[in-house]
Amino acid sequence: MTDNDKITEKQDAVAPAPEVETEEMALDDARRLKVLSPGMLVFKRFIRNRLAVIGLGILVVMFIFAFLGPFFSPYKQTQVFKGIGSMSKEYASATYNTELRYNVADGEAFGPGDRAQFLLAIGKNQSTFTSGANTFSISKESESTYRLLRLEPVAEELLGRVNPVNGATLSDALIEMYKKAKDNNQTSFVVDGVTYYLVPKLKATQISTAKDIALASLVVFDAYKPADTANVNSFAFKLGSIMAIIQDKKTFDVNGQVYKLVEEGGLSTIYNSAGEAYAEVSDIIVNPVDQANFLPVDFKRIIRETINNRQDRFTFKDETGTDVNYTIVRVNTIYNIKRDTPIELIRMYERPSLEHPLGLDNNGMDLMTRLMYGGRVSLLVGFVVIFLEVVIGVIVGGISGYFGGWVDTALMRFVDLFNSIPFYPMVLIFGSVMDALQVEPMVRIFLLMAVLGILGWTGVARVVRGQILSLREQDFLVATEATGIRTSRRIFRHLVPNVMPLLIVQATAGLGGVIISEATLGFLGLGVKYPLASWGSIINVASDAYVMTNYWFMWIPAGLLILLTVLGFNFVGDGLRDAFDPKMKR
Amino acid sequence: MQQVMETTNTPVQENEDLLVVRDLKQYFPIKAGLMQRVVGNVKAVDGVTFTIKRGNTLGLVGESGCGKTTIGKTILRLNQKTSGDVIFDGVDIFGINHQQLRDLRPRMQIIFQDPYSSLSPRMPVSEIIGEAVREHNIVPENEFEDYLDDIMRSCGLQPYHKDRYPHEFSGGQRQRICIARALALNPDFVVCDEPVSALDVSIQAQIINLLKDLQKSHGMAYLFISHDLSVVEHISDEVGVMYLGDLVEHASKKTLFQNPLHPYTQALLSAAPIPDPSRKRNRIILEGSIPSPANPPKGCKFHTRCREVMEICKTVVPLEREYEPGHMVKCHLYNDRKALNEETTEAV
């Protein structure tokens, strides 16, 4: 039962089918073909062209990137990104002291003449020298310190006879000691705690007491407190401290004050009785580069420590308590201390980061954002120029083709004239004129569009003219005349729709060319000007070989965008041409 | 000449002559040089005279390039004539202004040779056919769709074809669309410019029969231009033979096919294929090709290829002579045989 039912059902279902089928098979049945307008057919053919769809996809992405992208970009086109950078600035210089410094005892004199004689004597390795009426003895306490003593003769020995001088009284012990010293070829001897010096004078020998009058030393003193500077630089203090250092004493006293000496890392620090750091002793001079800067002693100390430790950088707290980095650069015998000064820097050529996916350009602007705005300009220039070209081209070509005859001849010669204008020289001249007139960047873009359009419409005019000439001879246009269709309808309903496909193809394919032209001009610096961007002008930085080789992210993205866009337009143009071609039955 | 009638600019109602073409000349200037000087003329149509009666068909045959199509276009004022008259239903086609011409357009239509180029590729069929109907208000707007359906049906098209575009049709269907476009304007006269030469033979027959049927039902006159004698023989009432812009022979179909007078007509007829392999044919092979219409031979234009060429042919242009009533011929052969007209006719 059920089976039978099924079969009958089946038969019922099948039975009408052949009829329908025969109807379907009829050559011109209403249901056989899906009605497609020529536009739909073109669209279908276009969609089947994979390359064209890829091109269209590229273009859609480009448009979203350029026209919608800026709305999502957190930055502005001309926003300059600055960062705190540090700049090394020469702050101080240090050097090992090679010049003897003189300290003269109170009430004494050691003038330039005396100093000259002293230096000569050192050169000759003499232990005494005479300057003017005075005779001085040089006591070399260390490699860097000389003690200068003025000799005051008390006696003179001649041929074994010792005679007092200047009314001095001579004790027997003194004479005894002198003879012993002379025999032993000593230059000094001590009697009752007083040192006597033997100074040969012609055939005689003078016996003199000595008095400390000056100190010549390479050692430099720095007082911790400016108020102490006078004391620190006093003869007595220096003599005391230097002698203490030389003699490796831990303490010494000057004018009744007891000072403590601590040696550390080639530096000696003197503490006063209260235990405060009182002065610094060193053989390194530190001077500020700018004399207005006061260098604190502990700053000098850290420099000296660093130099002695052969390091080249150190940190020191400035007045506000922040750490400042210093570097030491040695030039011959001079150590230059550079202070890292924090300054606001434009973040030029910054590498891509999360914050700036394509980095920052030579002006510290976000490259991604500039590419978006640049894309707007590049695409807009392309479209406006093509629009201009098409408008001028259609008018001239249309008139030429529709009217023919001498109008055609005249207009085509005009086109020839335009075609023989050399494009790049013309545009280069235009660019430099714009430069000279200092035209606003925005106005410049519009003028650029106008110039590109005016120089480029001839191709469109020729194509339109050719198409209209050939359409004019087509039977369907003759038929419109035969059926008495009015002129406006003939033009807009018959002529224009048939020129349109060609125009669309021409314009699409031409867009790529215009974008290339604009990019070329931008690259040459004659197109869109800073602060506005275009893809071409972004690539401009690559004209610097250093930028080109080191900052790939500066120009490769823009180059890729141009490449892809032009490729996209060309693919779409090709696709449209194929789609509009009725012979392409795909 | 018999066909000559009084020319007036007012339509004559009960005149059986619908179209009168008198001594029509159509030269195309040849321009050369920088200043585009006219250095010569292509004499596409060089003094043609004929008449088409209401509801009749004049077949026009001739080799390619002999000016058949030019005649067709010129009598519709799709070209500017050089001289001569074209009188359509008593109206001088070249004597009226553009508005009058536009009003006259629907009454005389043309069907082109190439059904592919004669339809605008970007229009649906309904617009192609209906465009001019609306333009000239042939029918009221509310009857428009029905009218279109009727026209399409009568031309062998289905109303559902309306929304389709020309590229979706075969050649024969396209030609039907062309016919429908012409027919929709309800014309009195249609120039059929080789309407079937682009089609295959089976479709040719359909189209020819369609044209004949339409003629019967609508009473149109045709100027049927073709180089195919069998087609012309099938559809025509009268036949004209053209050679190099000249109408060399013109007679009723029967007369012309039975008694071709002009050597060119004879050659043409002998060249036409006969669907009977057993019948022996005596073909007249024409030597050479058609001379340039820009520089036609002196005297009789056919003398370079005529096998009966005489001395007179090379210098003197033959006049049109009426060999027998309604049978016009332009040939020197018949200059002196005028008296023998009766005898010849009887003999044939």
Image (cartoon, rainbow, N blue to C red):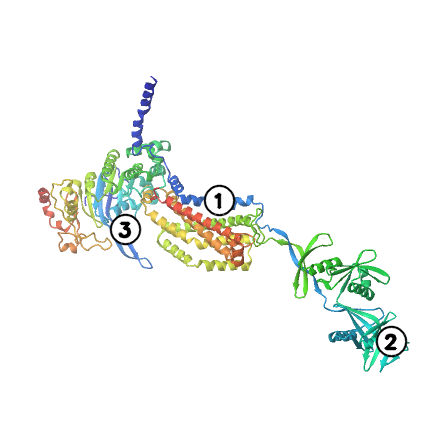
Of the residues under marks 2 and 1, which one precedes in the sequence?
A: 1
The quadrant the C terminus of chain A occupies is top left
Q: State yes or no: discs 1 and 3 in contact (Cβ < 8 Å).
A: no
Question: To which residue does mark 3 refer?
Answer: B82
Chain at numbered mark 3: B
In the image, residue A169 above or below residue A70: below
Discs 1/3, front = 1
In the image, residue A234 above or below residue B181: below
In the displayed structure, does residue A117 sit left or right of residue B223?
A: right
Residue B70, x across and y down, in percent: 26, 47
User: Secondary structure under badge 1?
Assistant: helix
Q: Residue furthest top?
A: A1
Q: Amino acid at mark 1?
A: Val
Query: What is the count of numbered marks?
Result: 3
Chain at numbered mark 2: A
The quadrant in which residue B113 appears is top left
Tell me if I can see residue B282 in this picture.
Answer: yes
